Every structure is written in structure tokens, then in C-alpha cells.
Amino acid sequence: MSASPLVVVHRDAALLAASVAARLVTRLVDAQAARGTAHVVLTGGSVGTAVLASLAESPARDAVSWPDVHVWWGDERFLPAGHPDRNETQAREALLDGLRLDPAHVHPMGASDQAPHVDVDAAAERYAEELARVARAEGTSRDDVPAFDVLLLGVGPDAHIASLFPEMAGIHEADRTVVGVHGSPKPPPLRVSLTLPAINRAEEVWLVAAGAEKADAIGLALSGAGPVQAPAGAAGGRRATVWLLDRAAAQRVPPALIRLSSP
Ligand SMILES: O=C1O[C@H](COP(=O)(O)O)[C@@H](O)[C@H](O)[C@H]1O
């Protein structure tokens, strides 16, 4: 059972990115205070990458013990390692390369030129195994995914999240935690994605989006459209589901859901 969504609206995309970066520091520090380690799931896309860039600029990032953070991805574009369009490459450039992370705690999804990942479905399977391996090693989860403290999701103009697109097979997955995506409407066509059962086991899910081109999709997702039409509306954390938007993206959000609109 997911927590009901709460919506926080910021003036513009830059303030949104800075505010999510600040929130992320607090969340990771709190998780480490409680458990020693923390698990974050990153998203690709415009706002997701802007959040990481903003965190890279913030002195508050040093409040986090980065070697004790596990970094995961919610989805990946199935391209060769180091390709500029990979979510991993963009995250490394925006933030990760400048942090003192433990390489064993960084868990990228497979790349299309890396054996044994050369097939997208095999890459998805391997990622599911990696999630289960860490979950078992930590013994903190009764599931086959670790206890994600925070899972970030961008939202596409078609209401997709991770690489779960409207009307496509991935959205129906009920058993597997990770799937290979064939024929994505947004390039590249091959992708790897966490599924809703994996996403919805996170403690906190934060959906981040900016820009007027997202407004209809977000309005639809928050007005009770089903997961097949609006996958974003089906994502939710066990403890919190927070939509972090700029004003332009929030234009069609039902007003009763908006908790805070910053000046
Ligand atoms: O392709 C992707 O798109 C979405 C949304 O990206 P945006 O640029 O419209 O914000 C992103 O969440 C996902 O991780 C990525 O692979």
C-alpha cells in the first residue's frame, strides 16, 4: 500500500533542482543516522540530472558519508558503456565522479557492449540478481530488493516513469523487479527498467518534473488515471510519495493535492 501523494510546487526548474538536492542530503543523512548505510535510486532525464548537478555545487553534500551510500538506477538506456545518452554517464558527469563513493556500492545497469549484458533481457535479469544479492547481504529486507530510502523518478510528457511507458508490456509486470524494454517510443528503443513492484517497495518515492509540456501528463496521473494510461500515477513509496514540481508542470494538478507552493 503506497502513501497518498503530496505535491510541492516551486517557482521554477532551477529552484526545484536546488530544493530537491537539499532534500536529498537530509534524507540520506537521516537514513545513515538510523542505519549506517543509505540506498538511493537515481533517475535520468532533465530534472533528475539537474538535481545531481545542483548537489555537486552544494557544500551540504559533504554532510553525507558517500562511501556508505548505495547508488542504483531506476532505468537505463541500453547503449554502450560511457555513451553520452546513458543515464549512468550523465549522473557520473553531473555528480558521481566528484564524490568519494565506494565503487562496490555503485550499481549501474548493464551496457549494450558489456558481456554478459549484450542482450537487454539478460541485462535486466542480471540487475534483478544484483538487487537480490545486496538485499540478502544486508538482511534488512524481506524482499528481493534492498530497502531503498529514496527513489527518484522523472516524469515524461506521456506520463512515463523510469522506462515504463503507457500501454507497453512493462507496466503490467507483477512478478519481476526489472525488465528489458523493447520498442521504447522515446529513443533509444532498448532500455532496462525497474518495474512497479520494485519501485513501490521504496520507502520514499519522489517524482520530479518541470515544464509546461509535462502539465497534462501530471494532471492525468494525479486525477486517478490508471497505470496503463499514466504510469506515473501508479508509483508510490511505502512511507511517502512526493511530487516535486515547478509551477509550469503543476498547472493541472488538482488544487486539493498541493501542500506547498513556494513563493
Ligand atoms: O528517457 C528518460 O526520460 C525520463 C524523463 O526525462 P525528462 O528529460 O523528460 O525529464 C526519465 O525519467 C528516465 O529516467 C529517462 O530514461
Image (cartoon, rainbow, N blue to C red):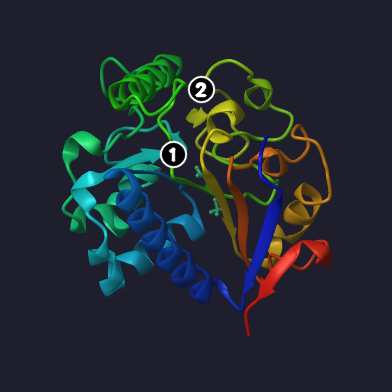
Count neighbours of disc 2 (C-alpha within 10 A) and say few if under 14, some if 14 to 19, many if 20 or more. Answer: many
Report the side of 101 relative to 152 (left or right): left
Helix, strand or loop for disc 1: loop
Reply above or below: 258 against 86. below
Which numbered mark, 2 or 1, is in the foreground of this view?
1
Lower position in the chain sequence, tag 2 or tag 1: 1
Give percent across and percent down for residue 225: 83, 42
Residue receiving disc 2: 177
Type of amino acid under label 1 = Phe
- Between marks 2 and 1, how big is the CA–CA gap? 13 Å
Quadrant (top left, top right, bottom left, bottom right) of the C terminus: bottom right
The quadrant the N terminus occupies is top right
Residue drawn at x 37%, y 56% is: 30
Q: Is residue 120 left or right of residue 110?
A: right
Q: Residue at x 30, y 34 (%)?
A: 107
- Density class for disc 1 (Cα within 10 Å; few <14, some 14-19, many ≥20) is many
User: What residue is pinned by disc 1?
Assistant: 148
